[in-house]
């Protein structure tokens, strides 16, 4: 393994890409420490001293790399871009114009990317305005007003600063993709989550208590490592559907007669279903913060959502949150898998190319076989995603301590690390070096 790291830095091109990526990480981390103009710094310090790692707001702070608790210009992080990308992917399925653009090739994808950028800026402006209001009313900060001078000019300055920060983060991600190593957007959220792990584990150590501190903390560490191993194993798991191509004679040439396979991953959807489900559960928690009263029917709804989905200010969530998140992830996994892999289109493509699955008739029989196989392997994949996502939250409920890292954060960190290692391995393989995974 040490030899692999040495080979990485002996190749000038690869070394330059890695150093450029690290430099962009440093710039991003520096931006998370710059507060927005107009914030009350004394009130901000008081709020920071009261923060806990768990709960809905802890999850938002985790994804922003700690920028949210700093009320930084990069408080929104890369989440508006991720939301915009998910929305564009969904719209591509239902809007024929977007689907045609995607099938045009590079020019069509550039147009969709540009629209995604515009949508990101719009979402960032809306979210920054909502965050500014929540920071002012104190409903987001436990009654502490971080924006005492709440005037239209001051609000516009804060919204403009946070929106510009999101655009800057999006630009950094594209720079990493073009000149660095790996996917820039994924690596930025990877760096954000990873930067909070020392603080999270330190807080877990402080809240485990003195009686069984070493045993409980050691159990959490072991469970964390086992989750990482399980994620790697499932991420690499796939069902290979054998494909054979009929021989065709054209003149004196014999074409076809080859065999290959379609790799159907157990976890085709990746971490997208977990992000979908987390966003759905996050929306009501943020929405009820705008309800001023705790009395009446609406107040009862607010108290239930705050206590069961938002943590009630304690940084913990109830068993209802665990169950709803688990079943939402299963549903979104089937939904997104159907978007990613279309058995009907795949069967038609195989039939046009003269390919067939041994023992299965071409056409509708092939489509039914692919659909049946995909549904069978998606079920354990969706259950695995749901379990990984809720295990830290469930442990937090059982042990009564806030666990700041969530299953989605572990999935993202491990998934991005694997993909980046694969790209580095391909660079090493081109130069006759053995890679990480071979």
Image (tube, rainbow, N blue to C red):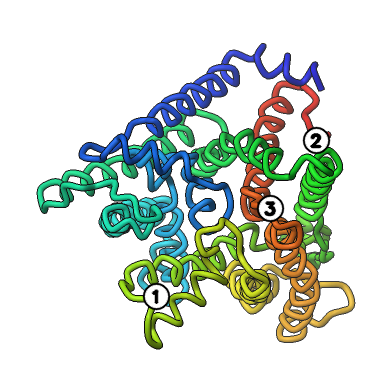
Horizontally, residue 411 falls left or right of residue 86, namely: right
For mark 1, does the 10 Å Cα neighbourhood hold few (<14), some (14 to 19), or many (20 or more) residues?
A: few
Sequence order check: which comes first, mark 2 or mark 1? 1
Residue occupying the far front of the picture: 211
Q: CA distance from mark 3 to mark 1?
A: 49 Å
Q: Position of residue 411 (x, y in %)?
A: 67, 51
Name the residue located 79 percent from the left edge and 42 percent from the top edge: 217
Indicate whether 84 appears above or below 205.
below
Q: CA distance from mark 2 to mark 1?
A: 40 Å
Which sits in the foreground, 179 or 137?
Answer: 137
Q: Quadrant of residue 102?
A: bottom left
Residue occupying the far right of the picture: 359
Mark 3 against mark 1, which lies toward the viewer? 3
Circle 1 is placed at which residue position? 96
Q: Secondary structure at mark 2?
A: loop
Name the residue located 24 percent from the left edge and 41 percent from the top edge: 161
Horizontally, residue 155 falls left or right of residue 32, namely: left
For mark 3, does the 10 Å Cα neighbourhood hold few (<14), some (14 to 19), or many (20 or more) residues?
A: many
Name the residue located 76 percent from the left edge and 55 percent from the top edge: 253
**Which image quarter holds the C terminus?**
top right
Tell me whether circle 2 and circle 1 mark residues in contact (CB < 8 Å).
Answer: no
Indicate whether 74 appears above or below 18.
below
Which sits in the foreground, 359 or 123?
Answer: 123
Which sits in the foreground, 223 or 174?
Answer: 223
Mark 2 against mark 1, which lies toward the viewer? 2
Horizontally, residue 220 falls left or right of residue 328, namely: right
Q: Secondary structure at mark 3?
A: loop
Q: Position of residue 167 (x, y in %)?
A: 31, 43
Circle 3 is placed at which residue position? 401
Mark 2 against mark 3, which lies toward the viewer? 3
Tell me whether circle 2 and circle 3 mark residues in contact (CB < 8 Å).
Answer: no
Q: Which mark is residue 437?
A: 2
């Amino acid at each position: 393994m040490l030899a692999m790291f040495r080979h990485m830095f002996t190749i000038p091109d690869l070394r330059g890409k890695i150093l450029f990526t690290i430099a962009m990480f440093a710039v991003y981390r520096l931006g998370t420490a710059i507060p927005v103009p107009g914030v009350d710094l004394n009130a901000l310090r008081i709020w920071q001293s009261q923060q806990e790692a768990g709960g809905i707001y802890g999850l938002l702070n985790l994804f922003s790399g700690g920028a949210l608790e700093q009320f930084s210009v990069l408080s929104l992080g890369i989440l508006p871009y991720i939301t915009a990308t998910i929305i564009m992917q969904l719209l591509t399925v239902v809007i024929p114009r977007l689907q045609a653009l995607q099938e045009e090739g590079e020019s069509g994808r550039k147009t969709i990317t540009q629209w995604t950028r515009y949508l990101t800026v719009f979402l960032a402006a809306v979210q920054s305005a909502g965050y500014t209001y929540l920071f002012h009313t104190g409903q987001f900060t436990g009654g502490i007003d971080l924006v005492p001078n709440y005037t239209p000019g001051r609000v516009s300055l804060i919204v403009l600063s946070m929106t510009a920060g999101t655009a800057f983060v999006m630009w950094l991600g594209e720079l990493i993709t073009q000149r660095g190593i790996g996917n820039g957007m994924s690596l930025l959220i990877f760096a954000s989550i990873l930067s909070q792990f020392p603080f999270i584990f330190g807080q877990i150590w402080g809240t485990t208590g003195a009686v069984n501190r070493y045993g409980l903390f050691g159990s959490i560490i072991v469970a964390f490592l086992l989750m990482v191993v399980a994620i790697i194993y499932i991420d690499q798991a796939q069902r290979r559907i054998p494909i054979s191509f009929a021989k065709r004679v054209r003149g004196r040439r014999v074409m076809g007669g080859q065999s290959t396979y379609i790799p159907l991953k157990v976890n085709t959807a990746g971490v997208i279903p977990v992000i979908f489900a987390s966003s759905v559960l996050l929306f009501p928690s943020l929405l009820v913060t705008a309800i001023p009263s705790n009395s009446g029917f609406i107040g009862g709804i607010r108290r239930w959502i705050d206590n069961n989905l938002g943590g009630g200010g304690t940084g913990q969530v109830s068993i209802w949150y665990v169950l709803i998140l688990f079943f939402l992830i299963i549903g979104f996994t089937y939904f997104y898998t159907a978007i990613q892999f279309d058995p009907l289109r795949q069967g038609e493509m195989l039939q046009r190319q003269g390919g067939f699955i041994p023992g299965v008739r071409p056409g509708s029989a092939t489509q039914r076989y692919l659909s049946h196989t995909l549904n069978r392997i998606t079920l354990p994949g969706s259950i695995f995603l749901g379990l990984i996502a809720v295990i830290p939250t469930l442990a937090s409920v059982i042990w009564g301590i806030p666990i700041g890292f969530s299953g989605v954060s572990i999935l993202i960190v491990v998934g991005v690390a694997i993909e980046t290692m694969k790209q580095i391995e391909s660079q090493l393989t081109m130069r006759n070096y053995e890679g990480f995974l071979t």
